[in-house]
Image (cartoon, rainbow, N blue to C red):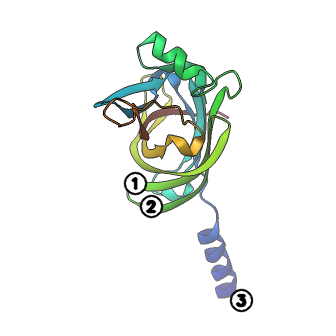
């Protein structure tokens, strides 16, 4: 009887879910950046207003989950005229579609500090599945006693998949703006206090 009870307790312990820590994104130490081809070069930009959470337990990457929200009007390429165009109905249409959102759906290929995070991205009022390549930067305590965790996530998106189709044909026949967008998220979060 004791062996059966011990086996049940052991199986129950092994099957118990991992309780991941929830981290609140620290917008002052996080960034959402992008790069896209423009004629013969590349233009970089970022979104200045982002928020969200991620769940993470060290040594249990499959417990990782994330949600995020970006203010479309906070787009910043350091050229105000271009930023106004990007906020207009020809691009992000910030008045109609004010937020970009992400919600993770599953973790795949978790190895060490790296994994692939599947999720649904809504941008320009269109929702599509995306896969982020995620790498953990570690966990530490800051000087004020808060527990912090860092994550870097990258992906490539085709802007046309999200209805961002504006373009112009140049004299030589090529398009002014590329379709492939390189995305880099550098995220630092603070453990939420109960």
Q: Is residue 163 left or right of residue 40?
A: right
Residue 103: x percent and y percent? 63, 45
Residue 1 disc label: 3
Q: What's the distance in space between the residues labelled 1 and 2, CA to CA?
A: 6 Å
Q: What's the distance in space between the residues labelled 2 and 3, CA to CA?
A: 39 Å
**Mark 2 = which residue?**
110
Residue in the picture at 46% in, 16% down: 82
Mark 3 residue element: loop
Q: Is residue 98 visible from the viewing direction of this image?
A: yes
Residue 158: x percent and y percent? 48, 45
Label 2 close to label 3 by CB (< 8 Å): no
* Dot 3 or dot 1, earlier in sequence: 3
Label 1 close to label 2 by CB (< 8 Å): yes
**Mark 1 = which residue?**
114
Asked if residue 7 is positioned above or below residue 54 in the image, the reply reads below
The quadrant where residue 97 appears: top right
Label 3 crowd (10 A; few <14 / some 14-19 / many >=20): few
Considering depth in this image, is 113 or 105 the residue closer to the camera?
105
Q: What's the distance in space between the residues labelled 3 and 1, CA to CA?
A: 43 Å
Considering depth in this image, is 60 or 159 the residue closer to the camera?
159
The quadrant where residue 42 appears: top left
Label 3 close to label 1 by CB (< 8 Å): no
Label 1 crowd (10 A; few <14 / some 14-19 / many >=20): some
Q: Is residue 22 visible from the viewing direction of this image?
A: no
The quadrant the C terminus occupies is: top right
């Amino acid at each position: 009887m004791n062996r059966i009870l011990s086996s049940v307790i052991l199986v129950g312990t092994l099957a118990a879910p991992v309780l991941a820590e929830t981290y609140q994104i620290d917008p002052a130490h996080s960034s959402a950046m992008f790069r896209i081809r423009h004629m013969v070069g590349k233009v970089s930009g970022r979104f200045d207003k982002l928020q969200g959470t991620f769940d993470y337990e060290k040594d249990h990457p499959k417990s990782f989950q994330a949600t995020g929200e970006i203010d479309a009007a906070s787009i910043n390429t350091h050229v105000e005229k271009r930023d106004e165009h990007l906020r207009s109905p020809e691009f992000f249409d910030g008045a109609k579609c004010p937020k970009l959102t992400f919600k993770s759906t599953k973790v795949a290929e978790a190895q060490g500090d790296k994994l692939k995070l599947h999720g649904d991205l809504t941008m320009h009022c269109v929702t599509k599945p995306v896969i982020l390549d995620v790498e953990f930067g570690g966990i530490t305590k800051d000087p004020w006693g808060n527990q912090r965790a860092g994550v870097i996530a990258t992906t490539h998106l085709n802007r046309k998949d999200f209805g961002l189709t504006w373009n112009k044909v140049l004299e030589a026949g090529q398009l002014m703006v590329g379709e492939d967008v390189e995305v880099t998220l550098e995220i630092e979060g603070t453990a939420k206090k109960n």
